[in-house]
Amino acid sequence: MSTQRSSLPPSSPRPSSPRPVAAPSARRLLAAAAAAAWLAASPAHAVGTRSFELESLEDLKGGDLTGVSVDSNGNVRAGLTLGATPLPEATSIWSSVVLPDGTVLLGTGNEGKIYSVSGGRVALAATTGQMAVSALAVAFDGDVIAGTFPEGKLFRLPRGAGNGGPAKLFAELPQTEDVWGLAYDPRAKALYAATGSEGKLFRVDGAGKAQVYFDSDEPHLMCVAVGDDGVVYAGSNGKALLYKLTGPGRATVLHDFDADDVKAIAVAPGAKGGAVYAIANKYAEAFAPPRRNRSGPPAPQPARAPKPGKGTLVRFDRSGVAEKMMSDDDTHYVSLGLGDDLMPYVGTGAEGQLYTVSDNHVARLVADTDERQVGAFVMAGARRFVATTDPAVFHEVKGVGGAAAVWTSKVLDAGLRATFGRLTWRSDGALELETRSGNTDAPDSTWSPWSPALAAPGDAKSPPARFVQIRARWSRDPGAVLREVKLSFVTDNARAVVTSIDAVPKGQTKPPRSNLPPSGGEAPKPVSALQVTWKVDNPDQDDLRYRLSYRMEGQATWRSMLKPGEKVTRPEYTWDTTALPEGEYRILVEASDELANPPERTQRHSLESGTVLVDNTPPVFRALALQGRRLTGEVADGLGPIARVEVSIAGLEEWRPIFPTDGIFDEPAEPFSADLGAIVPPGSHLLAVRAYDSAGNVVTRDIEAR
C-alpha cells in the first residue's frame, strides 16, 4: 500500500483479474486501480506458463488476515489478534471511552444506548432516548459526558457508572440538533462540543452552562480536539475546513481540504511537537444527518450502506505545514486515534479495516474485520480494541499474532482451469505455505482440502482448477516476515473461435446496408480492395495466427488469399480483388493458436462467410434520350442489380432520384422513364444522369435539354 493508495479489496475473498507481471520490487507503491487491481497473472496474452505474483499491499490483502498485518512495502508479518464480542441490541457504534478501571463504554445507535464492556461481557450502562450517542468524553472529575442527536442534548454518567437506566441530562445546547464531537480540556476544566446544524462550537462548564465559543459559517462542525497548550481545533462539514482557535471567536483556517468534511482530529502531546492529524473525506453521496420528530421515537435507519467515499489523512506540524500521510480512493475514513508510539491509526468506512502509517509513509493494514465500518477504536494504553458497525461488534486486542497467525490470500482466478506448478516466496524466518483449489469463485465444500505444507519453495500439490488460494502459517517462527509470493500455472488450452466475418470496400469503417453513398452525395472513386475483418472469441488470450482463403460461389476449391510466407496476426486484412473474375465469393478465416502452444496442443477453428460481391465494373447506359422534359433510357450491369439512377442540372450538384419503370431496382437491366418538368426549368440546360450498381460502381452520362 502506498500512502497515496487508491484501492481496497473487500474483506472477504473474491476472484482476481489477470494483469501483466511487473518487475519485483520490495517497495512497490499501490497505484490507482481498478477494483481494482487484485492479481498479477502474466503476461496479458497467454503464452505457456503464467504466474500469480503477490508483492504489494493490494495483492496481499483481501483474503483472511488472522493475526497478521500487511504494509505498503509488501511485507506480511504477525499483527493484532482480535477477539469478537457482538452487541446484538445495537446496530452501530459511534463513540467510545476507556474508564480508569479498564471498562470500555460504547455509544451506539439507533436507540441511543450506552453499553459497557468488561471482562468479555456486555451490559447496558445507560439509555438516552435519543437516536444515537455520537460522542463520549471523560470530563469533569472523571464523569463521562455523552453527546447525542437529533436534539442536541448532553448526558452525564458519574464516573461512567450506570445501571442501565436513563442517563442524567447534563445540558441541552440551544439551537442545536446534532452533537458530533466532544473534547475536554483538563487545565481549563472546559468541555467543547462540535455541533450542527448551525455549525457552532460550544464551551460547557462543570455545571452544564454552555456558551458559543465559535460560530462558523458551516452547517456542521463534525469534530473537536484540544492540544496540550489549550489550542482548540475543529473540523467542518461543507467546505471541509480545519479551524484553529486560540480564544472565543478567535479562529483561523489551518487548512481548506478538497473534500466534503473533516471527520476527526487527533493532537499529539508535546513530545511529538504538537503534531495535529486530521482525516477528511469526499463522499459519493450528499451528507444528510438523520432526523426525527423531537416528540417522537427514534426513526428507523435504512439498512442500505452508503456508497464509499474517498479519505485522506494529513499531518500538520507546529508551524501548520501540511503533509499528506495516506489517502484512499475506495473508502472514506471514519475514526482516528494515536497509538502508544503517537503514530496515527485510521478506521475505514468500508471493509471494516484499521490502518496505521509511519513517519516515512509506510502504511500498514493492522486489522481487517468482517464488519463494514470501524466506528471507534483505542490503540494506546493497556485497553486496546476495535469497535465496528454492520453489525456492531467489540473486538478486543488480545495481543500480537504469533504461532497462530495465518495469512490467506484472496481467491486467485486463472480464467480457465489451470494446472499449478512451483510455489515460491521470500521471507525472513521460517514459514509454511499451503494451497487449495476449486472451480467456484468462493471456497466451498467442492474445493480441495489444503495441501501439505511446504517449508521451502516447491511444487503446489492442489489439483487443477480455475481458482486457487495460498495460505501461510507462522507456527515455526512467530517473528517471520513474508513477501513476494509467486505461484506458476498453465491453463487448459481453450480453442479460439471465429464468430463473424465482414467484408466492405476499403475506406469504409463499418459494414453498411449497401455499398452506395448517401443519395445526392458525391460519386465515390472506384475501389477494388475489400477490407476483411473478423471477430474471435479467445478465452485464454493466446497469440493467434490467421489464414484466409476464398472460393467463387459454385466452386469447391479454396484458394489462399495470402501471399507466400505472409503471416496475419490481427483480425483484419485488405484483399485486392483487381485481378479476380467478377462474381460472388465466400471467404474462409482460420484461427490457430500455434504461436502460443506446441504442435500437440495447437487448436484451430475456421468460419465461412456469407457471399461477398466482387464487382469492379460500372454499369452502362444502353439507351438515353430526352424528349422535351421526359427522360427515357435503360441502364444495365454485368452482375447487377442496378441500385440507383439520379439526375442533376450540371453545376448544381443537386441530384434527384429516378425510379425504374416497374418501380423497383432489382434486376441487372432497368429501363426508366421520368418527367423532369418539375426539376428542369424552361431553357437550355446540360443534364447529368448517373447510375449505380449494387457494388457501388457508378457511370455518368450527359444530355442536353432544350
Image (cartoon, rainbow, N blue to C red):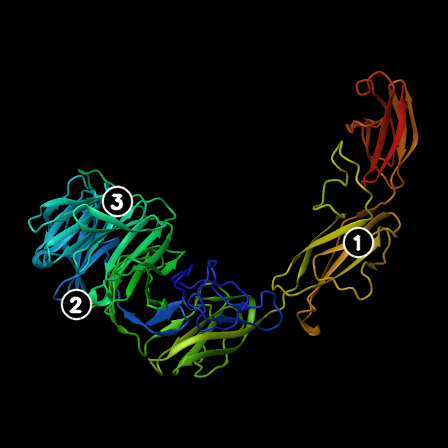
Q: Amino acid at mark 2?
A: Gly
Q: Badge 1, how many Cα within 10 Å: few under 14, some, many 20+? A: some
Task: Identify the element where label 2 is drawn.
Answer: loop
Q: Is 687 placed left or right of 70 in the picture?
A: right
Task: Locate residue 562, reporting x and y percent.
Answer: 80, 60
Q: Label 1, label 2: how many angstroms apart (C-alpha)?
A: 81 Å
Task: Identify the element where label 3 is drawn.
Answer: strand
Q: Residue at x 55, y 73 (%)?
A: 489
Q: Label 3, label 2: how many angstroms apart (C-alpha)?
A: 37 Å
Which residue in the structure is indicated by mark 1? 575
Task: Identify the element where label 1 is drawn.
Answer: strand
Q: Quadrant of the N terminus?
A: bottom left
Asked which quadrant contains residue 687, the reply is top right
Task: Locate residue 654, reporting x and y percent.
Answer: 77, 27
Q: Nearer the viewer, mark 3 or mark 2?
A: 3
Q: Amino acid at mark 3?
A: His
Q: Badge 2, how many Cα within 10 Å: few under 14, some, many 20+? A: few
Q: Quick one: which residue is furthest to the front in this view?
A: 319
Which residue in the structure is indicated by mark 3? 220
